[in-house]
Image (cartoon, rainbow, N blue to C red):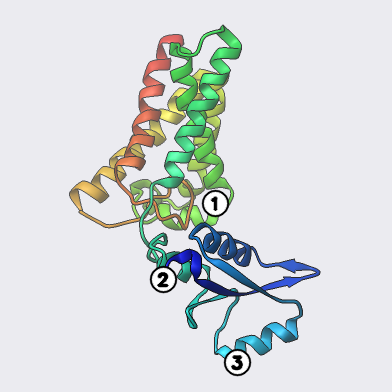
Amino acid sequence: MSKSAEKAVLYRMVMDDHICPFGLKSRHLLKSEGYEVEDNWLTTREQTDAFKREHQVDTTPQTFLGGRRVGGYDDLKRHFGKGKNEGETSYTPVVAVFAMAAAMALAATWAAFGTVVTIRSVEWFIAISMCILAVLKLRDISSFSNTFLGYDLVAQRYVPYAYFYPFGEALAGVLMIAGALLWIAIPVALVIGTIGAISVFKAVYIDKRDLKCACVGGNSNVPLGFVSLTENVMMVAMALWMMRML
């Protein structure tokens, strides 16, 4: 039987004060896979609780295919081979950061110089990347510090350094974009970049530890290794490059 001839039965919360986003995602995924969707709304808390008791489930939405319960949105993705296993590593956040930083650097170069690629666009790419990565760390600095303390050599000896690092990265990035107060930006980037590079290299390539990277903040699934090492090496390289402007 083809997918187009099959019917998916979906139960999802649609209330006056709440429309379940995972229900909408489940409906979209089912339609994109070619299923006709019987879309059943759970419009009250009582109705939702009764459904959960009846089917012995803890959450909604719930999808049924061929009379068999598949489960929630994550279960549905896995059913179609689109899901990720819990805890599976991913470089997606880092790719997003560097892609956006590159786009911003090229746009700024075009606006400032009327051309796309110059030495300044490379400088801005690195500096903007530093700023974006700093923002991701600062949005939950406590979570970042928990991950960072797992491998940074200085932070393990002096915990407040874990809280200073993202502020230092942000400060250096902003000053490098402006090309101002480089006598502050250069040593900050040089110090935290060097310490970071040594710490990552030791943890990954010498101690062979399997850790998550704090480069995009805490609680990420980005593996510690080449990406974090690249972040720190870029800071060091940028600091050394900008010494010519002093």
> What residue is drawn where x is 35% and y is 24%?
237
**Which mark is first along the chain, 2 or 3?**
2
**Residue highlighted by disc 2:** 1
Q: Amino acid at mark 3?
A: Glu
Badges 2 and 1: C-beta atoms under 8 Å apart?
A: no
Residue 149 horizontal side relative to residue 111, left or right: left
Q: Amino acid at mark 1?
A: Ile
- Report how far apart the C-alphas of labels 1 and 3 lie in the structure: 42 Å
Q: Quadrant of the N terminus?
A: bottom left
Res 124 visible: yes
Residue 44 horizontal side relative to residue 201, left or right: right
Disc 3, SS: helix
Q: Dot 1, how many residues are within 10 Å of its Cα: few (below 14), some (14-19), or many (20+)?
A: many
Quadrant location of residue 2?
Answer: bottom left
Quadrant location of residue 230?
Answer: top left
Disc 2, SS: loop
**Which mark is first along the chain, 1 or 2?**
2
Where is 116 relative to 32, above or below? above
**On residue 54, which mark appears?**
3
Where is 44 relative to 91, above or below? below
- Rendering coords of residue 67 (x, y %): 49, 83
